[in-house]
Amino acid sequence: EVTVRGIKLADGVFKFCPKLKKVTLKPGIKSITTWMFQGCKKLKKVSVPNTVTCIQDVAFVGCKSLKKIKLPSSLKRIGLGSFRDSGVQKIALGKNFTSLDSLAFDDGSKLQSIKVSEKNQKFSSSKGVMYNKKKTKLFCYPPNRKGKAFVIPKKVKTVSEYSFCYNQNLKSIVYFLENMLLLLHHFLYLNTL
C-alpha cells in the first residue's frame, strides 16, 4: 500500500510494480501521469482526490485487477489508452468533465458502462453509452458492453471516430443512414462483426 503526497508526479512513477495493490493519492495532486500505473497487474484500488483534473495517456494500461475506480467531480480529461487492457467495468464522469480521447478505453478494456452526471454541460449518457449533451453525437460505446446488437438512436446524427473500436460483444449495429454521417473507421478493430 502506498500513499502519495505532493502536487506533481513523474511519468511512469509506479510503472510495472508487480506487487502494488493499493494507492492513495492525497489532495494537491492534479494529474494521474502518463504510464503512472502501467502494467500494475495486481493493483485493485486507487483513491483519487478531488484535485485531479486529468488522467494522462496510458495511465492505467494493463491494470487487470482494477475493477472499479471512483473518479472525482474535478476530472476534466481522460487521455489516449488510459484504461487500455484494464479491468475497470464502469466509469462515472462528473459535471466538470470535458474531454475524452476516442481511444481511452481501447484494446482489451473491460468497460461495460459509462455514466455521465446530468449536470455536465457537454456530455450525457443513456444505457451506459456516452453521447454529447443533446444526444445527437455518439462518443463512446463501451468495448465490453453487454448485448450482441445495438440500435443507434434516430436522434444521433454523428458517430465519433473509433466509437465502437475493439468492441468484444457486438454482432450487429443498426443505424438510420438518412440521419447520420457514418465513416468506416468508426468500426475499425471491432472484433465481432
Image: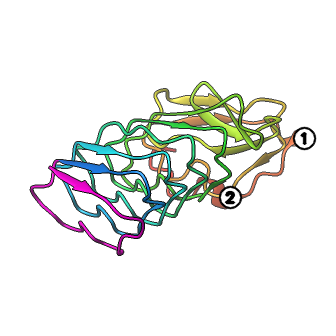
- Report x, y in % for residue 35: 35, 68
Q: Amino acid at mark 1?
A: Glu
- Report x, y in % for residue 48: 39, 46
CA gap between label 1 and label 2 equals: 16 Å
- 39 or 165: nearer the viewer: 39
- 163 or 176: nearer the viewer: 163
Q: Main secondary structure of the magenta part?
A: loop
Residue at 45% from the left image edge and 49% from the top image edge? 191
Q: Amino acid at mark 2?
A: Leu
- 18 or 119: nearer the viewer: 119
- Report x, y in % for residue 101: 59, 59
Rate crowding at label 2 as few (under 14), some (14 to 19) or many (20 or more) other CA atoms within 10 Å: few
Residue at 74% from the left image edge and 57% from the top image edge? 183
Q: Which residues are magenta?
A: 1-21
Question: Which residue is disc 2 drawn over?
Answer: 184
Q: SS class of the residue under badge 1? A: helix
Question: Which residue is disc 1 drawn over?
Answer: 178
